[in-house]
Every structure is written in structure tokens, then in C-alpha cells.
Amino acid sequence: MKLRAFHKLSYGLYLVASVYEGKKAGYIANTVFQVTSKPPLIAISCHKDNRSTEIIRKSGIFSVSVLKKELDVKIIGDFGFMSGDEIDKFNQREVITALTGAPIVLNEAVAWFDCKVHQEIDLGSHWLVIGEVQDSDLLSEDDPLTYAWYREKYKMFSPKNSPTYLEKDKLDEERKLDEANRPQPEEEQKPEGLEPHVCLICGFVYDPEQGDPTVGIPPGTPFEDLPDDYRCPICNASKEYFRKL
Ligand code: FE
């Protein structure tokens, strides 16, 4: 089986949210897909260990915000890599209440759907939750974010509980095997000090050639010269969690 074949499946990126007894929960998902049009049904795949899954199943409602292509990635860091026990993900965000009562996060979204759970299918590690759309809105004509574009831009991996998670060691092994069978181009040597560094928590790559314009780090800044309080723009991890690529 070729693991990287799975990377050729296309997805978007979405923020799924719900609430039960006043407790809001939300996470970032790529597996959100419309399964029928009459009635309009949307399916989401939810890991059994995630807090949001329990809240969706207990409340029977969820919302889906479709994220835009050019977005502030902090929303992915907060909803995708942090637990609701660590931070209040909804604080200081623009949130409205849907017809069903589900919270809808409007920040960085181009559209949203409000769904009532119609059916749940047990898939072992995940529940496939199918929701019937009760309401929806289009917020802007901006392009939606695709998972492939996001992965390419931020060199990200799927978090472990994602339905599309692939083990990084196995992927690397597969890549090495393929490369060994291919004629090798001249290896490009990065000048000393300009080696990219990867965040071990989320996979974000700091590339010194590009710097980090989101926090005013100019291009050409070596990782070692970043301020001590520099944090991963995706998952907020501190510098000690980065390793040279
Ligand atoms: Fe990170």
C-alpha cells in the first residue's frame, strides 16, 4: 500500500463546533463532506477521544464553518492543536448562535452550515456523524481553504486523532525508499544558519529565508536569532520544541 496515495485525496478545512449544557467545543476538520442533497446531509468524522465528539453526540447539533484560503492560522492552532481544557477557544472570537443552538465561529470563514444529527455510524476509532442542514449562510466570495494548499504552505501533518492521520515515520520510510530508487539531483546545501526548523508538535516549518511576517520577523533571520519568546504561529509551542530539519 502506498501511503502517499492518500495525500492525493482532496479536502477542505473546516471548523466544527457544538455546545452541550453551556459547554462549547470546537475542532478543525478536513473530513466534512456533503453526502446527499435531498435532504441536504453533511457527514463529519469525529475521533472518539475528542471532547467535541462527546458534545456533538450528546447535544445532537453541530455547526461547520468553511475556512478561507488566506487566513490567520492562529485559529487552526487554537482549534486544531489545543484542548478546550487548556484555553477558551471561543473567547475573543465572533460567535453567533445557530437555529439549532450550536455556536458558529465567523472569524476566517467564508460560509457556514447549521446541522442537526441525523445518524451516527461507529467506525471503531471514529464516529461518522451525519447531520441534516437546518440553515446556512455565505459570508464572502473569497476562496475556501483546501487541505492540500494548507499542507503545502505550512508543511503540516494531520494531528494524531485526524481521520486522515498518517504515521510520519512510515511516510518518511516510504519517501526514503522511493528516493533510493530514483536518480539523485545534486543536494542543495543551505548556507550555515539558514536551515529550516520544524515544530515537533504540529509540523510547522520555520524557514529563515522567509522569516515569519506574521510577527514581524524579516526574511533572512536564522532560527537561532529569533527572540527567546518566539512561538510557533500554529500551535503556540515555544522555541525548545523546534528541531533543525
Ligand atoms: Fe507548532
Image: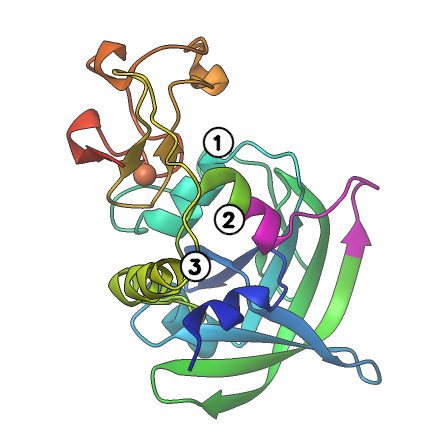
Q: Position of residue 211 (x, y in %)?
A: 42, 17
Q: Closer to the N terminus: mark 2 or mark 1?
A: 1
Q: Rate crowding at label 2 as few (under 14), some (14 to 19) or many (20 or more) other CA atoms within 10 Å.
A: some
Whether residue 90 appears in this view of the structure is no
- How far apart, in angstroms, are the residues tagged by discs 2 and 1? 27 Å
Residue topped by disc 1: 92
Q: In this view, does 112 lie to the left or right of 88?
A: right
Q: Which mark is residue 169?
A: none
Q: In this rendering, would 238 be left or right of 46?
A: left
Residue located farthest toward the front when viewing the structure as drawn: 183
In this view of the protein, which residue sits in the foreground, 220 or 96? Answer: 220
Q: Which amino acid does label 3 sit on?
A: Arg
- Residue at image point 51% right, 82% down: 128
Q: Left of 32 or right of it: where is 86? A: left
The span picked out in magenta is 137-150
Is-magenta flag for residue 60?
no
Of the residues under marks 3 and 2, which one precedes in the sequence?
2
In this rendering, the answer to whether 180 lies above or below 82 is: below
Q: Which of marks 2 and 1 is in front?
A: 2
Considering the image in quadrants, where does the C terminus appear?
top left
Task: Measure how far apart labels 3 and 1 are at the Cα level.
Answer: 50 Å
Q: Name the residue under label 3.
A: 182
* Residue highlighted by disc 2: 151
Query: In the rendered structure, which amino acid carries the disc numbered 1?
Result: Gln
Mark 2 CB within 8 Å of ligand 1: no
Can residue 144 be found in the magenta stretch?
Answer: yes
Residue at horizontal 58 percent and vertical 60 percent from the top: 102
Q: Residue 33, located in which quarter of the rendered image?
A: bottom right
**In the depicted structure, whether residue 205 falls above or below residue 16:** above
